[in-house]
């Protein structure tokens, strides 16, 4: 993906715009239509994946001028295939998302608690140990609660997912704009350095040469 962005700066801006719009749409639907979150999320993600996949394939076609194959085709195919899967099984994402987020929170909590125990063994500062214990307990509690109260946790998880997608999209747009500005500046600098330099050796206002006879020579000739 980095090589794709390096060759096509506009792809990063398109990718960021799609994720930003999808994240905002997920937050709005989660707050106003909580009963249709799963289908709405599947449709939004499917449309986003279709557009992203089409843009990848589109950029890959133009790169065939200099090569026989472009990895952008693989990214586009995977995005479109995943979008079709979400359209067919539009309620699948609800169960997968809740289980995934619950497992992620639980494992993060366990890791923090393990680090806190290790910090006791290595005699780290006590405030750091307390912070890690609190973070581990909080993440572990949220993970267990998301398993027990899946229906109640669904809306919160969707809102958090939308906010995360919007944040990722915004960051991608900023990076894409900065990269585009830098690329244009470098191109302008190269163009300025490649311009031929004309050396003007002749003076702009040449001074006329006043040729006068030599008085001494004329005098000597007259004497002769």
Image (cartoon, rainbow, N blue to C red):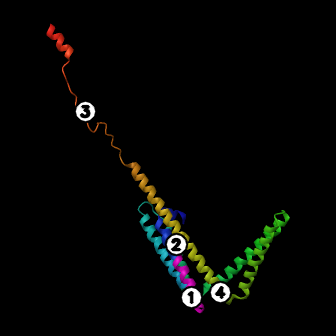
CA distance separating discs 4 and 1? 13 Å
Please report contact status of discs 1 and 2: CB closer than 8 Å, yes or no.
no
User: In the image, what residue occupies the spot 54% across and 66% down?
Assistant: 1
193 lies above or below 56: above
Secondary structure under tag 2 reads: helix
Say which of marks 2 and 3 sits in front: 3
Secondary structure under tag 4 reads: helix
User: In the image, what residue occupies the spot 49% across and 66% down?
Assistant: 177
CA distance separating discs 3 and 4? 90 Å
Q: Which residues are magenta?
A: 19-40
Say which of marks 3 and 4 sits in front: 3
90 lies above or below 59: below
Q: Give residue 151's position: percent from left, percent from top.
A: 67, 90
First in sequence: mark 4 or mark 1? 1
204 lies above or below 181: above
Q: Which mark is residue 39?
A: 1
Please report contact status of discs 4 and 2: CB closer than 8 Å, yes or no.
no
Please report contact status of discs 2 and 3: CB closer than 8 Å, yes or no.
no
Q: Residue furthest bottom?
A: 35
């Amino acid at each position: 993906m980095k090589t794709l962005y390096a060759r096509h700066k506009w792809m990063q801006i398109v990718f960021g715009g799609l994720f930003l719009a999808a994240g905002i749409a997920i937050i709005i639907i989660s707050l106003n239509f909580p009963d249709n979150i799963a289908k709405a999320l599947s449709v939004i993600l499917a449309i986003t994946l279709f557009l992203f996949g089409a843009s990848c394939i589109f950029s890959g076609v133009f790169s065939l001028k200099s090569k026989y194959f472009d990895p952008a085709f693989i990214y586009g195919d995977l995005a479109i295939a995943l979008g079709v899967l979400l359209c067919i099984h539009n309620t699948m994402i609800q169960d997968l998302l809740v289980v995934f987020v619950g497992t992620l929170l639980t494992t993060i909590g366990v890791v923090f608690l393990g680090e806190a125990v290790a910090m006791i063994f290595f005699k780290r500062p006590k405030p750091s140990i307390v912070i890690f214990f609190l973070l581990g307990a909080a993440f572990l509690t949220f993970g267990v609660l998301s398993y027990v109260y899946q229906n109640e946790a669904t809306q919160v998880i969707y809102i958090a997912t939308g906010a995360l997608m919007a944040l990722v999209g915004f960051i991608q747009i900023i990076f894409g704009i900065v990269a585009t500005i830098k690329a244009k500046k470098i191109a302008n600098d190269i163009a300025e350095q490649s311009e031929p330099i004309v050396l003007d050796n002749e003076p702009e206002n040449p001074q006329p040469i006043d040729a006068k006879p030599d008085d001494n020579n004329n005098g000597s000739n007259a004497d002769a």
